[in-house]
Image (cartoon, rainbow, N blue to C red):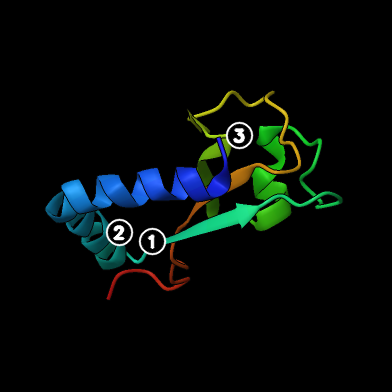
């Protein structure tokens, strides 16, 4: 599937369920979680790497939720799956935790 078609499908789902989309985004915002979409271009450090290496590449606060590949969605991929050029990684970035204890 072409990226513009995949994006159009996603936008259509958001329009059909706008309250659900807004609620999920508000929950993530409130928790301080940032959602990143990273397109793996040819030569990107993650090209050919296993999913298990995402935290090494992006940092320990990042979790791979899934990725898009040629119009298909891969949610909770196996650690041994390999990332390919053209994949779009969906990463959740946790907020920094304070090094101080509770007040």
Q: CA distance from mark 2 to mark 1?
A: 5 Å
Label 1 sits on a secondary structure element that is: loop
Question: Crowdedness of circle 2 by 10 Å Cα count: few (<14), some, many (20+)?
Answer: some
Mark 3 is surrounded, within 10 Å at the Cα level, by few (under 14), some (14 to 19) or many (20 or more) other residues, namely: few
Q: Residue visible at 51% across and 50% down?
A: 4
The quarter in which the C terminus is drawn is bottom left
Of callouts 2 and 3, which one flags the residue occurring earlier in the amino acid sequence?
2
Return the residue found at the far left: 19
Residue at which label 2 appears: 28
Mark 3 vs mark 1: give the one in front.
3
Left or right relative to 81: residue 10: left
Residue 23: x and y, percent? 17, 56
User: Image height check: is 95 above or below 41?
Assistant: below
Q: Is residue 66 above or below residue 61?
A: above
User: Residue 30 at what x, y percent from top left?
Assistant: 25, 66
Q: Which residue is mark 3?
A: 70
Residue at image x 55%, y 35%?
Answer: 1
Q: How many marks?
A: 3
Residue 91 image position (x, y, % from top left): 52, 51
User: What is the CA distance from the residue labelled 2 to the residue labelled 3?
Assistant: 27 Å
Give the residue displayed 18% in from the left and 47% down from the top.
16
Mark 2 vs 3: CB contact within 8 A: no
- Residue that appears at 76% across and 42% down: 85
Q: CA distance from mark 3 to mark 1?
A: 27 Å
Are the two marked residues, 2 and 1, in contact with CB atoms closer than 8 angstroms? yes
Callout 1 environment at 10 Å: few (<14), some (14 to 19), or many (20+)?
some
Q: Name the one closer to the observer, 52 or 5.
A: 5
């Amino acid at each position: 599937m072409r990226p513009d078609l995949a994006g159009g499908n996603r936008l259509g789902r958001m329009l059909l369920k706008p309250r659900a989309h807004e609620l999920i985004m508000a929950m993530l915002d409130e928790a301080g979680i940032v959602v990143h979409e990273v397109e793996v271009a040819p030569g990107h450090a993650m090209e050919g790497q296993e999913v298990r290496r995402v935290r090494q590449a992006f940092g320990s606060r990042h979790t791979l939720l899934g990725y898009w590949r040629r119009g298909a969605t891969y949610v909770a991929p196996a650690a041994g799956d390999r990332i390919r050029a053209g994949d779009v990684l969906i990463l959740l970035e946790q907020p920094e935790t304070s090094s101080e204890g509770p007040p």
